Image (spheres, helix red, strand yellow):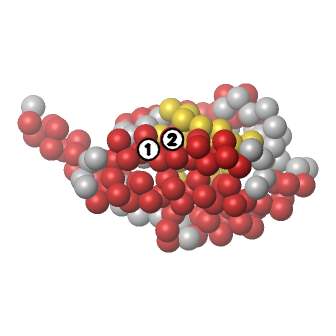
Amino acid sequence: AAGGSDDASTEQRQRRQPIMAGVQPLEGEEHLERILEESKAAGDGDVRVINCGAGWCGNCRLLKPKWDAAGKDAKYAGLRLYKADVSEHEDVGEALEVSGLPTFVFVRGGAVVERYKGSKWDVIARKLDDIAAHAAAGAATNGAGGDAGTAAASTAAAAAGSAA
């Protein structure tokens, strides 16, 4: 049994390694379910952020270059960033309880921990910065990411409250 837990620890450390650059498209509810299952299997150190928007949404179009740039930014290498066009994939919008656009959905360990509905890039960037810093600190301490991750979600929630 000890060998199994060592394998799981190794697998979790490997999943904290830098992730391929770029924002990944989220294409349908089945894809969303796979993303949530992978995140749950990876544990609390796994952070994924989904940008829910639509091609007809002006604020979504204005944020697109910044979101795409964040997906290529080395400081966010520990985060997995996605984009979902919820007018094309209404099932994703319903599953994530999106009620306005754009909405950024923060997932940790397979669970939605926060939503930010709005287009203030400074708020979004601050949330990404806080979460990336806590994820890096958790990875550096080999597994203490759960508590750091919870702190990141709390920090992000506080930042959203102060920006509102």
Task: Identify the residue at horizontal 52%, vertical 46% (top origin).
Answer: 155
Furthest toward the left, the residue is 2
Using the image as rendered, state which of residue 160 and residue 139 is in the foreground: 160
Tell me the amino acid under the disc marked 1.
Answer: Ala
* Marks 1 and 2, how far apart at CA: 5 Å
Rendering coords of residue 2 (x, y %): 8, 36
Q: For the residue carrying disc 1, how many other residues have a C-alpha within 10 Å: few (<14), some (14-19), or many (20+)?
A: some
**Which quarter of the rendering shows the C terminus?**
top right
Where does the image place residue 24, in percent across and percent down from the top left?
61, 55
Task: Give the residue type that dot 2 points to.
Answer: Ser
Q: Residue at x 33, y 53 (%)?
A: 138
Total number of numbered discs in the rendering: 2
Is residue 51 placed above or below 95 in the rendered structure? below
Position of residue 38 relative to residue 69, above or below, is: above
Is residue 154 in sight in this rendering?
Answer: yes
The reply to whether discs 1 and 2 touch (Cβ–Cβ < 8 Å) is yes
Residue 52 in view: no
Q: Residue 5: name its quadrant.
A: top left
Residue 154's label in the rendered image is 2
Residue depicted at 26% across the width and 48% down the height: 143
Residue 159 image position (x, y, % from top left): 61, 48
- At x 72% / y 59%, what residue is drawn? 121
Q: Is residue 61 left or right of residue 45?
A: right
Q: Which residue is at the front of the view, 37 or 59?
A: 59
Q: Which residue is mark 1?
A: 151
